[in-house]
Image: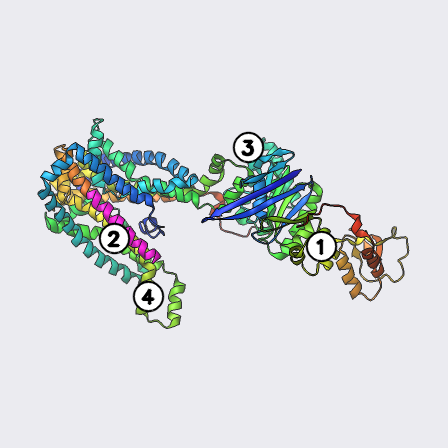
Amino acid sequence: MIEYRNVSKEYVSDGSRTLAVDEVSMTVKEGELVVLLGPSGSGKTTLLRLTNRLEELDEGSILIGGKDIQEEDEIELRRRIGYVIQEIGLFPNKNVAENIGLIPGVSGWSSERISERVDELLEMMNMSPERYKERYPAHLSGGEKQRVGVARALAADPDLLLMDEPFAAIDPINRQEIQEQFLQLQQRLQKTTIFVSHDIQEALKLADRIALLREGELVQFARPEGLLLDPAGDFVRDFVGLDRGMKVLELIAVKEIMQETEGEKINPVDGEEGPPIKRGASLKEALNRLILNEEERLKVVDEAGKRVGSINFSDIQSYLHSDYRAGYDDDFVSA
Amino acid sequence: MILFLLDNWQQALILTAEHLLLVAAATAIASLIGIPLGIIISDRQNLAPLVLDMANVLITIPSIALFGLMMPVLAVFNMGLGNVPAVVALILYSQLPIIRNTYTGIKEVDPEVVDSARGLGLSFSEQLREVLIPLSLPVIIAGVRIAVVMNIGILTIGVYIGSDGLGHFIQRGIDQAHREQIMAGALLVALLAILVELIFYRLEHWLKPEGLKAGVEDERS
Amino acid sequence: MLKMRGADEHAGKKQGRQSRFYRRFVLGFILVMLIYGFFSGLFGYMWEERLDLYYLLQQHIYLVGISFTLALLIGLFTGLFLSRGPLEKYQNLIMYFVGLGQTVPSLAVLALSMTFLGVGSRPAVLALTVYSVLPIARNTLAGFNSVPPELIDAGRGLGLSPLQILIHVEIPGAIPVIMAGIRMALVLNIGTAALGALIGAGGLGEQIFTGISFFNFNLILSGALPVALLALAADFFLRMIEEQFNSG
């Protein structure tokens, strides 16, 4: 859906030229959430801003839905792309409803339609419209502001969403929560999203695929497991961390390797004890529990608490030793 | 002085009205020129030093010299004396506070807010209308306020090139060595300036956008 | 309560390097004047009257020189005095009245001075001094108030005496704002001195007012242009000095 072809951008300052983005090529699929990951100065924000022409590229081209962005009026382009930044930048002179409804408003929507859309989006963000519609940004917490920021970006139902470290300014505790909520939102909306982050954990958690950048160059573009299990070079290896094996465990959910059983009527399998574990929990958590419990097996339940299966050490072991790596296909881009 | 004012209250009223009208006209026109100029240079930064310096030169030239300069220039249009050169001089004089405040007001809007506005797809004129001007309005009005108060004082000198206004009390007071008359003129000018300034302060407060007035109170339950 | 006017609006803003446009403007202005002056016979006239003009110029500078020196002394010390602790609450009150004082137009101050002291240069100098003290005093006070209290605290912590703190911390910190006030006051002074002609103090204003009553442009300009130049020159040089303080 978005195609970057040999995109380059350079900056000239005081006579010296730096390549902020260096011949980056990649393709983002429809509905995919790609995280642009890298240390500061890696060009990830620049690449993002090139996408909605807040910066103009020097070489190469970017196509959205097959159409070259250079051929489109930049204002029109930006209206069909959602944009969320770290400091959010809510308009302080407008209340929540006015902030969200601004772009639809200038795009000619009727006021009823805007009003409905505002309510709809606030509900989606778990913010009750009655309580929040008329509030001003000055009266919102960091997390609330950010959610309004996301709602505002989604207001005109854009084809594509651009997010520049949107959760970085939120304290770590609330950040977890808002990431979860965002993940759920994304599963529901399936919006093609480009998400800039410098945090490997965040990337692993949210991304369908990760584009790791360094000094403007695309070093690796792969699914999270790909970066962890097949890092393309030392830089990647260092960036993801020495505990990348453990990180892989965080990516796999219990439900993928548990022994399934049906319903309550089956007797609990021998040895199963201790508090149950949710089927969506990660292997890392399962391992943690198994180590802490004295018994050998854990009961796995669904969101409602109903028993759906069971898991133990050897289940995990056999999975990791199996050919699970072959279970996914993707594009690797090596340095 | 009070006696004088009471005796001549009709004239005091007329002169005050004239004075106010002339200042109002001059400042209004100055704003119509200066505010758009300020907006333009906030967008085109490269023009900013040029325009601001020009305005700076104008305000540095002493008022009497500026009034004097108006005469030969406007005499070409047969308007070398009277209210016209005075008002023109006031317009030129008050460009700096108006342009400068408009410019800084817009520049000082939080850059993150501006980036969001641009990124979401607002054109420059839409940015102005929806975000930039509402947020910088108090500062812009403050610039107009400074200009008005300045003009009220300077217009007193305008009588010497034939304008109307409270300067007449002072001029006659000098000619007749009549202290009360001078004081009456000075008092009225000062009162006018203070009054207008207070009105403007109210206006600035009134025009502050809703979202900025409140502090961060805790409405959240 | 009325906000402190003047200081916050004109003064103290960190001016960057004096933009090259400003220099060009002043020079351009002079150039235009030169061309006009040459061709319109203005310069011819001025050259003829050069002795008189020179005399008026001297008078003008005399008026400015004396009144401004006095205003500097009074203004700086008043501002300094007011900034010292115990008069905190009176500070605002006094500055409020100073602010009020600035709404009285310069012409009126001159005229009133005349009613007390008669005509001539003495009442003019008095009026000019009074008129120039206000912006200097206010900016001096504002300048001292603008010095971050942390710096003063650091000075005390290091063991500096109050006098040393004043010299090494407060004055350097207050200078930008004070300089801006001085600059503004001088420009106003030069302009108002031209009005002194109305109360018999002479100066370049003589040419301007005589020129107006006779509708003689050469007369007017032979007074207005030098006054404008004086003011621009004063402003220009003081800005340069300000810059030295800001960077050096």
For the residue carrying disc 3, how many other residues have a C-alpha within 10 Å: few (<14), some (14-19), or many (20+)? few
Left or right: where A234 falls relative to B172: right
Letter of the chain that mark 3 sits on in the rendering: A
Residues at discs 4 and 1 both on one chain: no
For the residue carrying disc 4, how many other residues have a C-alpha within 10 Å: few (<14), some (14-19), or many (20+)? some
Residue assigned mark 2: C134
The tag earlier along the polypeptide, 2 or 4, is 2
Residue assigned mark 4: C168
Frontmost of labels 3 and 1 is: 1
For residue A92, above or below residue C96 = above
Horizontal and vertical percent position of residue B66: 23, 38
Horizontal and vertical percent position of residue B164: 21, 34
Q: Residue visible at 56% across and 40% down?
A: A59
For the residue carrying disc 1, how many other residues have a C-alpha within 10 Å: few (<14), some (14-19), or many (20+)? many
Frontmost of labels 3 and 4 is: 3
State the mark number for residue A73. Answer: 3
User: Which residues are drawn in magenta?
Assistant: C227-248
Three-letter code, disc 1: Leu
Q: Residue B92 appears in which quarter of the rendering?
A: top left
State the mark number for residue A228. Answer: 1
Letter of the chain that mark 1 sits on in the rendering: A
Three-letter code, disc 3: Asp
State yes or no: residue C179 in magenta: no
Q: Residue visible at 21% across and 59% down?
A: C73
For residue A239, above or below residue B120 = below
Three-letter code, disc 2: Leu
